[in-house]
Amino acid sequence: MPEKRAQRVFEVAGGGFGGKLMVTRSTGRAVREALEEALVELPKGGVLYVDTRGVELMDYSFADEALGILASRGASGEYGDRHVVLVEEDRDLLENVEASLRQRSLAMIRVDELGGEPAIVGEVPDHLVATLQAIYDAGSITNAALAAKLGLNHTACNNRATRLAKLGLIHRHIETAAPGGRQYSYERIV
Amino acid sequence: MSGVLTMGSLDPAFSAATRVDGEPIVLDLRSVEFVEPAGLCGLAALLEYLIPRCEEVNLALAGRDVPAYLERMNFFRLFGGRVRTNADVASLEERRRHNPGTLQELINFHTEPEIPGIIERISEILENQGYRLKERVAICSVLSEVCANAAEHGASSFGAYAAVQAYHHIVSGPRRRGEEVLVAIADGGVGVRETLSRNTEYAEHTTTDNDALRLALEMGVSGTGEIGRGGGLALVAQIAARAGGSLSLRSGTGRVTVYENRKNSRNVPQFPGTFVRVSLPRIPSQEKSSK
């Protein structure tokens, strides 16, 4: 089972930024800065739920500045081992988030509500989708077990999972195995 | 000048404006019977170009409807002190203003932080008109992206002008049943070609204004080349086309119009800045199926 993680919920519409109408890069920048502040306050391994359900309108510029750049910085390791999950239903508002993340070749985990089933928004390369699905199905899995499940050699499997971890879609950690040995294991983040 | 004041009908005036050299001029709009937001913003941009170059600008208007509409759209509040007109503006200003809840008056803005207020106002108008959330989102996304482009790339002495009108029939092309929202935004900045030319990657694709406009409508194309930039206009065109409407982008001597299944380019008289007109129709389903 995946370990229990620290989490915090950030309600975008309740933050005094633009209420239900989230438009322009300057508003997006203000929201991103608040999200970054909340994110780095979390302990390592923590998850920030970005709840946009109270927002009626989000234009592309806002979505890219607030969430696209946040995902991009997360993927470059700027926030350490901390994750962002979007809390949003499957509705038109997602279109601009999707467009921004695809433009950046990035993705985010999305849930309809806290505790809901995870889905993907953005772009996950085809060859990584099965790996991601297997990790989420298992909840927590070692590289060896994942490689066996997918019919991959250990190195290829580790490369794929490392890429998913860099995208912020899974949690990856090292376990000490038999004397001198170590192995990677992967966990879903929600 | 034709009966409808729109983006294209001001072409002869834009063409003549480049030859103005300080003398007083008369802008003859007496044949105009109907003004749409693109005509209003185009007129505002034209006047901003002419006023510093002329001793005096006279605006000739006929009848009462067009002056009344211009007054209702705040045109005289913005330009009354800078142009002369034969219209009796004082009597128009004394009238009690009817607020049909279908329009955003001509508004002048300079910076991005002014945009959310404009969007909020439009969203309210659309909600009052019974537009569903999904439609409001599409329209407001269009407007905010285009306004943001104008504020960001404009570098314009007068900032940008925007106007919006919701109609209870289709006004683009032959009049027919349905509803239509027209959005127009004009800025007096450097234009699309110069903005994109800053990105050396596009040197070969910005030889003409029309080349640059077509490029600007592609996803991910921007003057800075930053990832994530240059998505707004492409998405606006998609939204408009999906609704059965269009997006016209004009800058320099180019004009590109994007429809659902085609993209038209043509050469036009020089426009000093960038101009965007978006048509978002709501056509009744029986009208669509009979087309």
Image (cartoon, coloured by chain):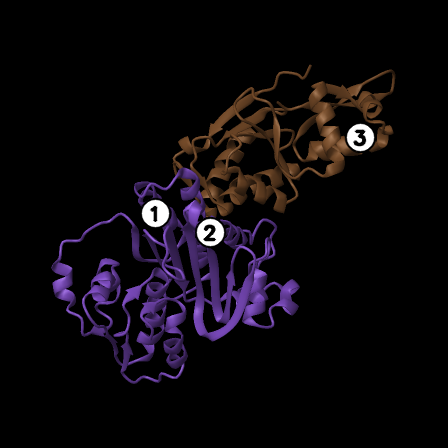
The answer to whether residue B93 of the structure is visible from this angle is yes
Q: Which residue is mark 3?
A: A158
Rendered residue at 61%/63% (across/down): B199
Q: Colour of chain B?
A: purple
SS under mark 2: helix
Report the residue that reaches farthest toward the front: B290
In the rendered view, tell whether residue A62 sits above or below residue B191.
above
Image coords of residue B28 (percent x, y): 28, 77
Dot 3 surroundings within 10 Å: few (below 14), some, or many (20 or more)?
many
| Left or right: residue A157 compared with residue B237 | right
Image coords of residue B140 (percent x, y): 41, 47
Q: CA distance from mark 2 to mark 1?
A: 31 Å
User: In front: A170, or B264?
Assistant: B264
Rendered residue at 74%/34% (across/down): A128
Q: Which mark is residue B60?
A: none
Q: Are marks 1 and 3 on the same chain?
A: no
Chain letter of the brown region? A
| Circle 3 chain | A
Instruction: Look at discs 1 and 3 and give the one toward the viewer.
Output: 1
Q: Amino acid at mark 3?
A: Asn
Q: Which mark is residue B122?
A: 1
Dot 2 surroundings within 10 Å: few (below 14), some, or many (20 or more)?
few
Instruction: Look at discs 3 and 2 and give the one toward the viewer.
Output: 2
